[in-house]
Amino acid sequence: MSNPSIDIPNLLYRYANFIDAGDFASAAKLFDKGCVEAEGYEIKGRENISQLWKDWIFLYDDVPQTRHLITNPIISISDDLTNASCQSQWTVLQATESLPLQPIATGRYDDNFAYADGAWYFTRRKYDGIDLMGDMSQHTRKALKETEE
C-alpha cells in the first residue's frame, strides 16, 4: 500500500543519495517519466539528464565529495491521490583534499509527482534557485547555461 507522506520524501532522499554517490545514471532513472528544469531549460531522458550532471559536477574518485541534505518538504496531494507537488530545501556540504568540510550552497526544489502502477514517481523537478552560496569552485564546473550550449 502506498503512503505518499513516506514515498515522496523517500524519492527526495534517493535522489540526494545517488548524486552524492556519483551515480548519475540511477539519479536520472528517477526522472524516466519526467524532466529536470533549471535556468529555463527542460531536460528530458535518462541519458540527457545524466550527462547534464556529468558535465556540471566535479568528481573525485568517481564521487563529488558532497552530502546533499534535503529538508522541510511541504507536500500537497491531489484529492484523487494521483498527483502531488512538493517544495523542499537543500543544503550541500562538501569536503575535498583542498577544501575543508563546509556548506557550499543552499536552495530550493519545486517537484511534481504522479502515482501509477503502485508507485510515486517524479514528473518534474525544478531547481528553484540558490538562496545562499559559498565556495562552489570544487563542486560545479560551469554554469548550467554553458553545459546546454
Image (tube, helix red, strand yellow):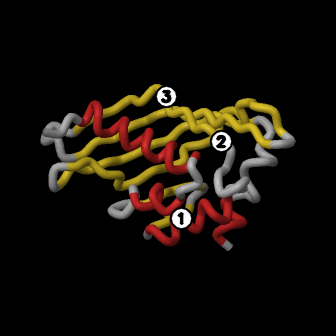
- 41, above or below 111, in the image: below
Number of labels in the image equals: 3
Where's residue 23, x and y in %?
A: 53, 56
**Mark found first going from the N terminus, 3 or 2:** 2
Contact between labelled residues 2 and 3, with CB atoms less than 8 Å apart: no
| Residue drawn at the location 43% of the way across and 35% of the way down | 87
| Residue drawn at the location 49% of the way across and 28% of the way down | 71
The residue under label 2 is 66
Q: CA distance from mark 3 to mark 2?
A: 16 Å
**Mark found first going from the N terminus, 1 or 3:** 1
The mark found on residue 71 in the picture is: 3
Question: What is the three-letter code of the residue carrying label 1?
Answer: Ser
Where's residue 136, x and y in %?
A: 77, 44
Task: Report helix, strand or loop for mark 3.
Answer: strand
Task: Report helix, strand or loop for mark 2.
Answer: strand
**Mark found first going from the N terminus, 1 or 2:** 1
Q: CA distance from mark 1 to mark 2?
A: 17 Å
The mark found on residue 50 in the picture is: 1
